[in-house]
């Protein structure tokens, strides 16, 4: 490494994220300072199908990955040789989408002689909480990760040191929002659409079931989804669920508000119970559903310790969080092999 390189004021990591339907490339300094954060969303493309269409997602990443990386470097005013490492999401996610990002990262790392770090998507979500952070962290930290694919509780004892307490047994929280939105004839992604519709509704109008799964840190949302479906069918008995547009009589705001209240109730209460049980110093909430204001409010109200949530634009998938996670692994001396494979079902474990 050259003298100029070792004198550099900060470690710069290029992050790449293509695990689902967003192509992301970002440069982050010292794991906390966002120098650029480019996100080319495919939401509009998939909205037509009411969910992510995997084949289309990977083909779209093929088209957008190079422009995304180029823009991330341009906006950071950096060239490739001013980077210290490339971090890329290697799983979990859609295999065909992950391959595009991982191969782009490998090509870049190989051409520029940079180390590469394969990052777990959930770890990246956790590290969205380090972006813009200027205080020292105090462990243990309770992490509630709620996204389209996960509703997990982890106890984090230090950087890269995780213990999984529990998670969803069926639908993830975000998945439940997306499926219920579809039942109500609301657009994809369902979370923001339900949150918006719920603002006009009464959360106590329909008492939907809560699956507490006592004595575990697990979640289950499929019963709730079925309960919403049963309620919707009262209004459209002759029609299949998921009709778009919905029946005119369907009380969408009340259904949305009552469903949201049931999800928030379980997530917030279980996270707070876990934080108490394990004497967590902080609760970190990350993933797409952490954008939900009702969830934030409920956690703030109940928590025995500070609750940290990412700024709204960093809740959903982005590459800055991948770069941040990569920085902490880079600093710990870790490197991935250039022949690393994608891992669609990767577990987040202590290492
Ligand atoms: O983390 P993310 O961008 O992708 C995954 O890794 O899955 O999360 C996307 C999920 C979607 O299911 C979306 O409906 C949900 O996050 N979401 C929300 C909100 N914004 C996004 N759920 C509830 N309330 C929101 N405001
Ligand atoms: Zn995600």
Image (tube, helix red, strand yellow):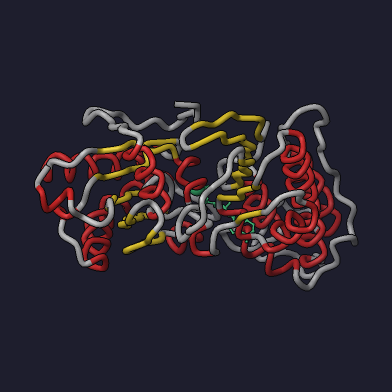
Task: Give 5 or 129, whichever is nearer the viewer.
Answer: 5
Residue 324: % across, % down:
39, 49
Residue 339: % across, % down:
23, 27
Q: Which quadrant: the C terminus?
A: top left
Residue most extreme to the bottom: 200
Q: How many marks?
A: 0
Viewer can see residue 245: yes
Q: Is residue 23 above or below residue 280?
A: below
273 left or right, relative to 28 = right
Residue pictured at 34% horizontal, 32% vertical: 342
90 left or right, relative to 240 = left
50 left or right, relative to 221 = left
Residue pictured at 83% horizontal, 30% vertical: 214
Task: Give 348 or 330, whichever is nearer the viewer.
Answer: 330
| Quarter, ligand 1 | bottom right
Task: Report which quarter residue 26 is drawn in.
Answer: bottom left
Q: Which quadrant: the N terminus?
A: top left
Q: Is residue 185 above or below residue 153?
A: below
Residue 67: % across, % down:
23, 61
Task: Give 91 or 268, whichever is nearer the viewer.
Answer: 268
73 left or right, relative to 178 = left
Task: Report which quarter residue 100 is drawn in.
Answer: top left
Residue 183: % across, % down:
70, 54
Viewer can see residue 97: no
């Amino acid at each position: 490494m050259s003298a100029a390189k070792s004198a550099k004021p900060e470690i710069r990591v290029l992050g790449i994220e293509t695990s689902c339907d967003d192509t992301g490339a970002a440069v982050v300094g010292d794991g906390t300072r966002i120098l650029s954060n480019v996100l080319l969303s495919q939401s509009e493309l998939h909205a037509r199908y009411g969910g992510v269409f995997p084949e289309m997602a990977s083909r779209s990443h093929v088209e957008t990955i190079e422009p995304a990386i180029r823009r991330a470097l341009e906006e950071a005013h950096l060239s490739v040789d001013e980077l210290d490492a490339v971090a890329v999401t290697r799983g979990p996610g859609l295999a065909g989408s992950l391959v595009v990002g991982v191969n782009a990262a490998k090509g870049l790392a190989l051409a520029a002689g940079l180390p590469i770090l394969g990052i777990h998507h959930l770890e990246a979500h956790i590290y969205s909480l380090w972006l813009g952070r200027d205080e020292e962290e105090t462990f243990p930290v309770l992490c509630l990760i709620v996204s389209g694919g996960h509703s997990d509780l982890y106890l984090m004892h230090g950087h890269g040191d995780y213990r999984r307490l529990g998670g969803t047994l069926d639908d993830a929280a975000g998945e439940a929002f997306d499926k219920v939105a579809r039942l109500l004839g609301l657009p994809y992604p369902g979370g923001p659409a339900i949150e918006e519709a719920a603002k006009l509704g009464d959360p106590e109008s329909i008492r939907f079931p809560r699956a507490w799964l006592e004595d575990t840190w697990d979640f289950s949302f499929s019963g709730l989804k079925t309960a919403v479906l049963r309620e919707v069918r009262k209004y459209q008995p002759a029609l299949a669920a998921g009709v778009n547009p919905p029946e005119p009589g369907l009380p969408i705001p009340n259904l949305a508000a009552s469903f949201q209240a049931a999800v928030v109730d379980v997530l917030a209460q279980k996270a707070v119970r876990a934080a108490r049980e394990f004497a967590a110093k902080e609760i970190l909430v990350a993933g797409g559903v952490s954008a939900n204001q009702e969830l934030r409010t409920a956690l703030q109200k109940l928590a025995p310790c500070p609750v940290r949530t990412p700024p709204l634009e960093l809740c959903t998938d982005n590459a800055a969080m991948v770069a941040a996670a990569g920085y902490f692994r880079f600093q710990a001396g870790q490197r991935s092999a250039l022949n690393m494979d994608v891992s669609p079902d990767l577990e987040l474990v202590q290492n």
